[in-house]
């Protein structure tokens, strides 16, 4: 196990330092872990809430409304489950030294993009190309 990298509380990755140096890598690792933990905490609250809400509601409109809310909540949880898989993938890329580089071009992904979307696997240009190709095929 490697020693933990010191990271000042106000640290933010900067373009003028070596790309994906230890501090940047640690910054994104912590950001991803915090994000994952907040999703897991939210999920636990949802499960508790759904268990509490399991009751017999005599009014059919109220029951329908509650079932709609529950279905929406389950869809949200499913999206979050997929997001956790992407976060885990990003954490794996950090461990393998591949994090921050575009899957398409191998070029560094901008720090601004990674800060906004730490699970990004494509540079902005590659993502835009991908979306244009997708749109063309979707219109067929």
Image (tube, rainbow, N blue to C red):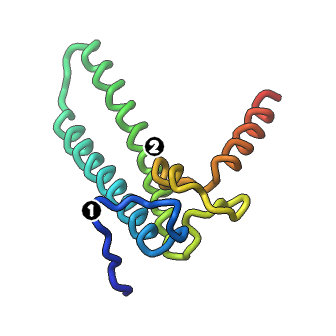
Residue 132 vertical position relative to residue 93 in the rendered view, above or below: above
Q: Position of residue 113 (x, y in %)?
A: 53, 50
Residue 135 vertical position relative to residue 106 in the rendered view, above or below: above
Circles 2 and 1: CB distance less than 8 Å? Answer: no
Residue 54 vertical position relative to residue 25 in the rendered view, above or below: above
Which image quarter holds the C terminus?
top right
Q: For numbered disc 1, what is the local secondary structure? A: loop
Q: Where is residue 55 in the image (x, y as percent from the top left)?
A: 18, 30
* Residue depicted at 26% across the width and 51% down the height: 41
Is residue 93 among the parts visible in the rendering? no
In three-dimensional space, the C-alpha distance between marks 2 and 1, rounded to whole angstroms, equals: 30 Å
* Residue depicted at 19% across the width and 17% down the height: 58
- Kindly identify which residue carries mark 2: 79
- Kindly identify which residue carries mark 1: 9
Crowd tier of the residue under label 2, counting other residues whose Cα lies within 10 Å: few below 14, some 14–19, many 20 or above? few
Which image quarter holds the N terminus?
bottom left
Foreground: disc 2 or disc 1: 1
Which quadrant would residue 37 be assigned to in this image? bottom left
Q: For numbered disc 2, what is the local secondary structure? A: helix
């Amino acid at each position: 196990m490697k020693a933990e990298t010191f990271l000042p509380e106000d640290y933010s990755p900067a373009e003028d330092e070596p790309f994906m140096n230890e501090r940047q890598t640690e910054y994104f690792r912590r950001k991803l872990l915090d994000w994952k933990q907040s999703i897991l905490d939210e999920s636990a609250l949802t499960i508790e809430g759904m268990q509490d809400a399991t009751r017999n509601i005599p009014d059919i409109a109220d029951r329908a409304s509650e079932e709609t809310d529950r279905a929406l909540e389950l869809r949200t949880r499913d999206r979050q489950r997929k997001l956790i898989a992407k976060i885990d993938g990003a954490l794996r890329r950090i461990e393998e030294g591949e994090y921050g580089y575009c899957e398409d071009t191998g070029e560094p992904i901008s720090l601004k993009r990674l800060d906004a979307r730490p699970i990004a696997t494509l540079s902005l240009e590659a993502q835009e190309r991908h979306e244009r190709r997708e749109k063309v095929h979707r219109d067929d």
